[in-house]
Image (cartoon, helix red, strand yellow):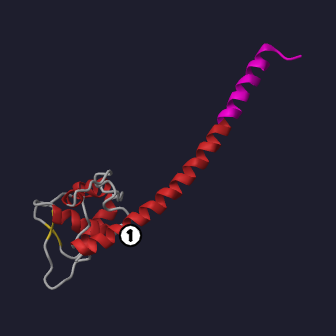
Amino acid sequence: MTTRIDEIVKGLMRELVAEDEALVKAGLILERAEVQFEVASQKYAAVRDVVAAYLGRPPCVDDALHYGLAFRSKDRYRFIHMAPGDAIVVILKDEDEPMELNEIAKAMAKGGLSVTLRTVNAALMNTTGVEKTEDGKYRYVEPEGRELPFE
């Protein structure tokens, strides 16, 4: 003989099984979406690098506007799949004033390249043309006789 509590638990278990099924289906959709995103982001990075070769730097929203086009992402993926040092060069060249470590990291993340402060710091120390100012900020100084990655 089943009790009222057993009937309630059985009903709740049915609901839980249904939610488990929904969660499994959602997980499969998420896995497919992650694969699609990876493929799309790799293609984007490849085309971006070709455009960068022509422009001498990675393209941005303003470049698209110049050609009567618009990036729907608003530069959200500008640095995706880019080496941290290359992104740092672009960021520092875009800025008129020296930047702090955390500002550089935020700019990288805003452009789709999420890295730790430790990674940013290492890239800053190992990237030609990056100089640290007396107040602990960073700027880019064009190295003499050196070709840049996007030129």
Q: Is residue 107 left or right of residue 13?
A: left
Nearer to me, 28 or 97: 28
Nearer to me, 101 or 11: 11
Q: Residue furthest right?
A: 1
Instruction: Look at the image and tell me in which quarter the N terminus lies.
Output: top right
The answer to whether residue 120 is visible is yes
Stretch of the chain drawn in magenta: 1-19
Magenta run includes residue 66: no
Identity of the residue drawn at 15% across and 79% down: 143
The answer to whether residue 123 is visible is no
Nearer to me, 145 or 67: 67
Q: Position of residue 97 (x, y in %)?
A: 10, 59
Nearer to me, 72 or 118: 72
Q: Is residue 31 above or below residue 98?
A: above
What residue does disc 1 label?
A: 46
Q: Is residue 133 left or right of residue 103?
A: left
Q: Residue furthest top?
A: 4
